[in-house]
Image (spheres, rainbow, N blue to C red):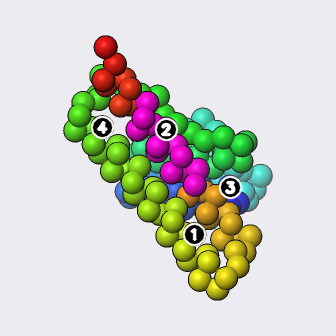
């Protein structure tokens, strides 16, 4: 998926949408739109997008950046916030990511062939599933390690 589209979708899913993000980053609505659509030579800086991730918990940008670089984003284990309930929530997230992966695959196969757009969606879902699995396992190890 084109990075611009990833960023637009990520920002539109943030509570309060574009106006909330503009306010958080200290932009006017016009400056926000210029960055979203790369007009007037403006674009987001990586630091601004990482700030959104840290504030709102959205990882779409870094997920896509890592995927394009041949890897995946797996957050560090927050040992001070980890308990069995949190681990169960992470495992539920992992199963959800797996379900989304196979749903994307099933949808793509309905007509018997996979288009490049469908392939991109499947690969994105695969990356999210693998990252969720790795994070869940890392947390289980940390939580139960002697």
Span shown in magenta = 126-138
In terms of depth relative to the viewer, which is nearer, 28 or 124?
Answer: 124
Among the two numbered marks 1 and 4 on one chain, the one whose residue lies closer to the N terminus:
4
Cα–Cα span, label 3 and label 2 = 24 Å
Q: CA distance from mark 1 to mark 3?
A: 22 Å
* Tag 1 residue: 105
Which label is found at residue 3? 3
Q: Mark 2 or mark 4, which has the lower sequence index?
A: 4
Q: Is residue 45 visible?
A: no
Residue reaching furthest right?
41
Residue at x 42% of width, y 44% of height: 57
The residue that mark 2 highlights is: 134
How far apart, in angstroms, are the residues tagged by discs 2 and 4?
12 Å
Under circle 2, the secondary element is helix
Q: Would you name the residue on which mark 4 appears?
A: 87
Which residue appears at 42% of the width and 35% of the height? 137
Q: Earlier in the sequence, mark 1 or mark 3?
A: 3
Q: CA distance from mark 4 to mark 3?
A: 31 Å
Query: What is the distance, in whole Å, between disc 2 and disc 1 at their CAs?
Result: 21 Å
> Where is the C terminus found, in terms of image quarters?
top left
In terms of secondary structure, where does tag 4 sit?
helix
> Does residue 100 appear to the left or right of 67 in the view shown?
left
Q: In the drawing, what numbered circle is on residue 19?
A: none
């Amino acid at each position: 998926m084109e990075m611009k589209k990833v960023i637009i979708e990520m920002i539109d899913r943030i509570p309060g949408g574009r106006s909330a993000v503009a306010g958080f980053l200290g932009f006017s609505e016009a400056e926000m739109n210029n960055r979203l659509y790369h007009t007037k030579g403006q674009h987001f800086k990586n630091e601004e997008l990482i700030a959104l991730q840290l504030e709102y918990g959205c990882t779409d940008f870094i997920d896509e950046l890592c995927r394009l670089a041949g890897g995946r984003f797996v957050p560090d284990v927050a040992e001070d916030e980890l308990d069995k309930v949190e681990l169960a929530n992470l495992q539920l997230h992992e199963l959800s990511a797996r379900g989304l992966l196979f749903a994307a695959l099933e949808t793509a196969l309905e007509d018997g062939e996979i288009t490049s757009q469908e392939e991109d969606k499947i690969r994105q879902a695969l990356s999210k599933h693998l990252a969720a699995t790795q994070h869940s396992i890392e947390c289980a190890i940390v939580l139960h390690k002697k």
